Image (cartoon, rainbow, N blue to C red):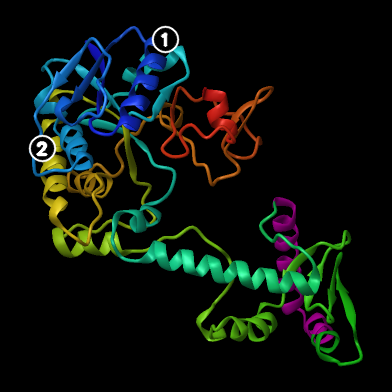
């Protein structure tokens, strides 16, 4: 038989999330729903008819206890069934939810996360990369504010601007590979009496040291000029800053740690798995035993944060499953608040790419900003 299972204990907010998610799942699923918990830790009771109550080790905090339960489910649940584990913040939106079991591929089946392994690394390690990135972002914000005082507001990450930037970049390449074009560009760019000049549909204004399109929008900056002008005023050395693309924080510290500690090399660009939804049965025991053992062992390690996803990646590669089939994205549709391409519109539906295409999530993973009434995603779910 197919069954859904949650593993939750501790704070009131998690129990409330669980109640919301169970209610939604009951609307659409015909399968049994089990909750595994440690009621001794719960701030409020869990209202559900099918609960397995487990006493977790007293030395664990509530977060560790929840992970303990999650990674040992195969030892706590009845044998002979196929289970679908769900985090308490995974909400069912469709009657297709029971079809998730059709996608099971032994020995275990997870869904992909929404970013490569190196982008998860700063969230799994106490390596200061998140803090450094936050500082990096503060300096960039100040830098952009100073530049805006001189040329007006600009947004180089806007979709139409990015299209223009690519076109301008291609023009630069063509100019560079033409002797006449390169000579002309050099003279126009550096002769002092030339105040502006054009390249295709773009114009470079020396008074502002930037390229603009025909609409007067900034397409590209002379970053070398502005770094030397502004960064020293912010107490920064221009030589320490390569560019000003505010990328998502990422690092190789988790990969290095796993390599050095366990002798397993995981590439930073590997599309790692998300632990919020997964299918398992009796054949999953060896995989889950190893995941549980390594996850619990890492609780005492001050260099790694208390998570289960880094050890999940370790287990995947340990068992040679890095290319194993994963669940379709609609069965763990991760709602990233910071990604403005992820959105909802009442007439069009859900999207992950700014409405270029429409998504049809079955299970939505709202791992942060739960209850945020300003967020279109939460309002749609509520």
- Mark 1, other Cα within 10 Å: few <14 / some 14–19 / many ≥20: few
In this rendering, is residue 220 above or below 71? below
Number of disc labels: 2
Give the residue at mark 1. 27
Q: Can residue 87 be seen in this view?
A: no
First reached walking from the N terminus: tag 2 or tag 1:
1
Q: Name the quadrant containing residue 162.
A: bottom right
Secondary-structure class at tag 1: helix
Q: Which residues fall within the magenta stretch?
A: 159-185
Please tell me which residue is depicted at 67% across the width and 25% down the height of the picture: 348
Where is residue 342? Give x, y as percent. 57, 38
SS at mark 2? helix
44 left or right of 285 in image: right
The answer to whether residue 136 is magenta is no
- Does the magenta stretch mainly form a helix, a strand or a loop? helix
Which percent across, then down, holds residue 285?
11, 31
Q: Quadrant of residue 20?
A: top left
Looking at the image, residue 347 sits to the left or right of residue 308; the answer is: right
The residue to which callout 2 is attached is 289
Which residue is the extreme one toward the bottom?
Answer: 192
Task: Please tell me whether residue 186 is drawn above or below residue 344 in the rendered image.
Answer: below
- The reply to whether the C-beta atoms of the residues labelled 2 and 1 are less than 8 Å apart is no
Q: Is residue 320 above or below residue 379?
A: below
């Amino acid at each position: 038989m197919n069954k859904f299972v949650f593993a939750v204990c501790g704070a009131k907010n998690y129990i409330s999330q669980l109640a919301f998610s169970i209610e939604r799942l009951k609307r659409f699923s015909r399968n049994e729903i089990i909750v595994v918990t440690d009621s001794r830790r719960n701030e409020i009771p869990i209202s559900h008819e099918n609960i397995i109550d487990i006493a977790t080790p007293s030395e664990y905090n509530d977060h560790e206890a929840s992970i303990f339960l999650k990674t040992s489910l195969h030892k706590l649940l009845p044998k002979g069934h196929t289970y679908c584990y769900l985090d308490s913040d995974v909400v069912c939106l469709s009657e297709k939810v029971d079809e998730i079991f059709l996608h099971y591929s032994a020995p275990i089946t997870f869904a992909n996360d929404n970013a490569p392994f190196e982008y998860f690394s700063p969230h799994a390690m106490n390596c200061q990369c998140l803090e450094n990135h936050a500082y990096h972002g503060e300096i960039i914000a100040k830098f952009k504010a100073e530049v805006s005082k001189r040329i007006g507001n600009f947004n180089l990450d806007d979709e139409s601007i990015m299209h223009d930037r690519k076109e301008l970049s291609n023009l630069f390449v063509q100019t560079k590979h033409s002797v006449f074009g390169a000579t002309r560009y050099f003279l126009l760019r550096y002769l002092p009496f030339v105040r502006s000049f054009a390249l295709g549909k773009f114009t470079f204004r020396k008074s502002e040291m930037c390229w603009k399109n025909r609409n007067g929008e900034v397409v590209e900056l002379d970053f070398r000029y502005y770094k030397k002008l502004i960064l020293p005023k912010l107490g920064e050395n221009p030589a320490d800053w390569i560019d000003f693309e505010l990328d998502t924080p990422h690092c190789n510290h988790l990969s290095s740690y796993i390599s050095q500690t366990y002798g397993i090399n995981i590439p930073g660009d590997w599309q790692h798995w998300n632990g919020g939804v997964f299918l398992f049965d009796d054949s999953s025991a060896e995989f889950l035993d190893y995941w549980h053992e390594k996850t619990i062992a890492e609780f005492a390690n001050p260099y790694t944060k208390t998570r289960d996803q880094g050890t999940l990646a370790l287990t995947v590669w340990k068992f040679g499953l890095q290319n194993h089939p994963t669940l379709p994205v609609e069965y763990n549709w991760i709602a990233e608040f910071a990604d403005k391409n992820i959105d909802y519109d009442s007439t069009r539906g859900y999207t992950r790419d700014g409405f270029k295409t429409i998504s049809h999530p079955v299970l939505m993973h709202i791992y942060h900003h739960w209850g945020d009434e300003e967020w279109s995603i939460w309002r749609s779910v509520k």
